[in-house]
Image (cartoon, rainbow, N blue to C red):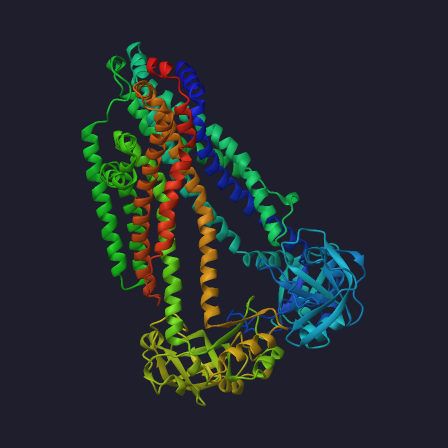
Amino acid sequence: MTVMKTARRNFLAHKGRMALSAIAVLLSVAFVCGTLVFTDTMNTTFDKLFAVTSADVTVSPKEPADGEENPNRGRPQVVPGAAVEKVRGAEGVKSAEGGVFSTAVTVVNSKNENMGSTTGAPTIAGNWNDGELKSMKITSGRAPRGPTEMMVDADTADKHHLKLGDELRTIAITGDVRAKISGIASFTVTNPGAAIVYFDTATAQEKLLGAPGTFTHINVTAKDGVSDEQLKKNVAAAVGADTYKLQTAKESTAANKKDMGFLDVMKYVMLGFAGIAFLVGIFLIFNTFSMLVAQRTREIGLMRAIGSDRGQINRSVLLEALLLGLVGSAAGVAAGVGLAVGLMKLMGSMGMHLSTGDLTVRWTTPVTGLLLGTVVTVVAAYVPARRAGKVSPMAALRDAGTPGDRKAGAVRAVLGLVLTGIGAAALFLAAAADKASAGSLWLAVGVLFSLIGFIVIGPLLAGVVVRLLAAPVLRPFGSVGRLAERNALRNPRRTGATAAALMIGLALVACLSVVGSSMVASATDELDRTVGADYIVSSQGGQPLMPQAEQAMRGVKGLDHVTAYREVEARITAPDGTTAQDQLSATDPSYAQDVRRKTSAGQHKDAYAAGSMAVGSEYAAKHHVKVGDELGVAFNGGKTVKLKVAAITLDEGNLDKGVKYISTATAEANLPADQLPRPFMLLAKAEKGQADSAYTALKAAMAEYPQYKVLNQTDYKKDLKDQVGQLLNMVYGLLALAIIVAVLGVVNTLALSVVERTREIGLMRAIGLSRRQLRRMIRLESVVIALFGALLGLGLGMGWGATAQQLLALQGLKVLEIPWATIASVFAGSALVGLFAALVPAFRAGRMNVLNAIASE
């Protein structure tokens, strides 16, 4: 009980000093709990949606026997209308209704603006039927009647300010449909962000499927007392067990949830960044308790002198940490729920609607947050607690804050050098690896050991690096600068731990910057070397190019040629007898001009002759294929033929690596017209001297189809750079939490350091140091600590990034580019971080009463 009272008294006595550590725990726990609540809420939203929209049994076209996706022909597979009557006749069927569902559409308004989602959610077009009433209700107007009417969902109408009577254009592979809005329907469950339009059944069949009397699926409802499994068996008996794909509501929901795997990826990525924030927080907590123990050395010595044993002192400090962990974690759990709600609002502003009514806080979330935050805090305080337990009763006679054990410092230096050496060796092995898989393992080992090594060796490096930084940063400020330097060097262990927190976040920033810049530079270099096409047209949402868009492009004046690029599914049998499902790239012969592929045998252009093909060098080596060999090619939904290998392309770059080429004519000869995939990309080259005019004309011709991007090579490079930049910005945003915690660590260190040096500050003020000089001294000390952490972090991160680039070189990304502007900006920004962190401690130091400060102990 005495130990508990002592811990509680000390905790409350130093509550101001504990506050920043508590904030670090709070932020880390909030990130974890917010991530769990947010992803659980998204799962709940989709679970409800899938449960409501799934019929008791769904009948849909049968998947290929090999389980592979069918080639994207731009229109869904269908079941004949006659199947609906067969299903209705099955035993136990209460009702059966055909449905039309297509995501291969684009909806635009009168200004040709895309009405689809901006978050990656699909645009869905279908027929309005009784099944839709499970999840939708008409809140304005009426259901569509005839080909000139359509209905939209309320979220899309609100977002784009649509109203009854507005005309929308729906672009499908079967043609354009212009119809006026006759009704607006609202979701009865949460709409995650998809844009939905409805037509009457006949119009949907004709305009979306191009096949009147057909459906994409049949929704079957069971009679009372008939289970879904029994209904499935009855329907299978009526239509043929192997004729269609049959799914119960449970199976349909599970299949839909499987397609939402990105939610798990998002969850674990965000938790990974939360882990980084926890790691940084450990240094903050460690520093806080180390300094508190040092400042209470005399107090602890007195407690030992009056009978407290080591265990009691140790437990007292750990109980303080336990209280800190519990308080910070409890606040973090509450903040995490708030963070999740904030993320939901943010996603709502971007178009993904998540209702707070679906907010899901599982019991495991607060338990995880409390346990994680508390355990991490207690673990971080363990070493300072052991030090406190080792304080002898004689310490009561000495000044507080005695220097650390030199032997321990020497052991730490040797251990740090060994760990850093292991990390450097692993990074060297990663850079020298011949295979990416082996290199990735060495890279992970190198990153781990080099990071730990730098953390351990930080105090040793502080003595060297701070002196180097002091020359240009501190010395110009004269005696104040020299005092700041000595303060930073006074306790290298503390300086190293404070800088390490900032080092971790900036090391990751530098690493990712190097990797991102190298990826862009490598891709740009490869485009310059291999791409001969002037223009590239592709879909923003992965949709195939529709015939009317392709026709518009081919009609542009000033183009030398247009090349269609499509992918064909087939089973390929190599000369060694190996058979596997694979893809063939079916292109026009002009593709050999658009993309300059080097070959190890034969010529790329020869692959477009009748009965010929090209394979990649890795495939050729693995299956002992050489020019002149014949491969068995069984086209999915088409013929089985023998194709002669006319060329082997070198898989040395990243563009089209491993691609097997055939001509469009070969694909057309061996596939029925309704099974031939649509192109997903068109390439074009301008006639000599017509580059600018052809580009202008091409953009004008494709303006009617906003779902497609028209890019010249400059646009393509910029688009690639923007995509990588957006990804990096997202990562930097997640890393910002760790950097914020690191800044709190600098603030806390300075604040406790000011308290520790109260008497010293009073004496300096008494002999003439002004308030302005005192504040400047503390700010300069903060700046040099921040720059020390930044220098270590950026150097370490650039080493990681350069090693990672060597692994990427095995995948064709061979250009190493260091983003010096970004590195310099981050380094300069670290100085600003140091200035910001010192504001409050410097202000408090400047307000000290000189006489009270001198009288303090």
Q: Position of residue 488 (x, y in %)?
A: 29, 32
Can the viewer see residue 818 in this picture? yes
Q: Quadrant of residue 783?
A: top left
In the figure, 334 relative to 850: above or below?
A: below
Front residue of 468 and 139: 468
**What residue lies at 66% left-to-right and 58% top-to-bottom?**
54
Q: Position of residue 854 (x, y in %)?
A: 33, 15
Front residue of 631 and 110: 110
In the figure, 831 relative to 611: above or below?
A: above
Q: Position of residue 340 (x, y in %)?
A: 56, 43
User: Which residue of the protein is positioned furthest toward the top in this rendering?
Assistant: 306
Number of numbered discs visible in the structure rendering: 0
Can the viewer see residue 546 in this picture? no
Front residue of 375 and 383: 383
Q: Is residue 244 left or right of residue 285?
A: right
**What residue lies at 56% left-to-right and 66% top-to-bottom?**
541
**What residue lies at 55% left-to-right and 67% top-to-bottom?**
540
Quarter containing the N terminus: top left
Q: Is residue 182 left or right of residue 521?
A: right
Front residue of 472 and 227: 472
Q: Quadrant of residue 576?
A: bottom left
In the figure, 809 relative to 749: above or below?
A: below
Quarter containing the C terminus: top left
Q: Quadrant of residue 816?
A: bottom left
Q: Position of residue 43 (x, y in %)?
A: 58, 50
